[in-house]
Image (cartoon, grey):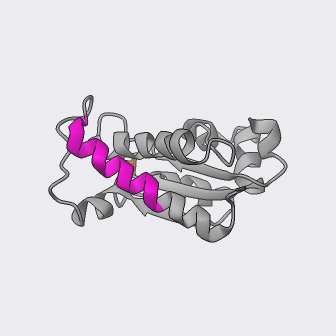
Amino acid sequence: MEDKAEKGNKVLVLPCSGIGKAYGEMARQAAYTLIEDFYPDQVITTCLAKLMIGDPDAVNLVKNNTVFTIDGCASDCARKNVESTGKKVDHSVRVINIFKHHKDLRPTGVLDLGEPGFKLVQFLAEDLAKEIDCLGKKED
Ligand code: SF4
């Protein structure tokens, strides 16, 4: 996956690492949904922790691809870590902002987001897929 990504024709989606927080878990699940259900050949991800320690492979992925970040809250950990490499993110979202427009979709817990939480994850993934459509990244 990373070899292909170095060619620079992918969308790298990076969720924050909000372990123990429902919004962080939703960010991760939205990234997986985007990759698995929408763009398995176009979208890739890597571990944010690798980027935080300056891992060369992770930094190259960021520098050579279109980058989307998904942060749980206004701390914007994923976006800030990307921008610490000198790269400006191409698109960033916050789960908490999406939630403000869908307050009925409150996750039931961190370990089990429940049906409402996964509906919000689906909204997030759909919004990101539309952004990719706008970028003309879809191969079909
Ligand atoms: S953006 Fe918010 S939820 Fe995500 S890792 Fe940072 S503090 Fe946690």
Q: Residue furthest front?
A: 140
Q: Is residue 48 left or right of residue 56?
A: left
Residue 115, magenta (yes or no) = yes
Q: Is residue 23 left or right of residue 54?
A: left
Give the x, y percent position of residue 117: 25, 44
Quadrant where the N terminus is found in the figure:
top right
**Does residue 79 show up?**
no
Residue 67 occupies which quadrant of the picture? bottom right
**Does residue 65 show up?**
yes
Q: Is residue 16 left or right of residue 40?
A: left
Give the camera-side residue of 83 and 38. 38
Give the x, y percent position of residue 14: 55, 48
Quadrant where the C terminus is found in the figure:
bottom right
Residue 29, magenta (yes or no) = no
Q: Residue at x 68, y 67 (%)?
A: 136
Q: Residue at x 77, y 47 (%)?
A: 60
Residue 55 occupies which quadrant of the picture? top right
Residue 112 occupies which quadrant of the picture? top left
Over which residues does the magenta segment extend?
Answer: 113-127
Q: Residue at x 22, y 36 (%)?
A: 114
Q: Total number of numbered labels?
A: 0
Give the x, y percent position of residue 49: 56, 37
Give the camera-side residue of 98 and 73. 98
Looking at the magenta stretch, what is its main secondary structure?
helix
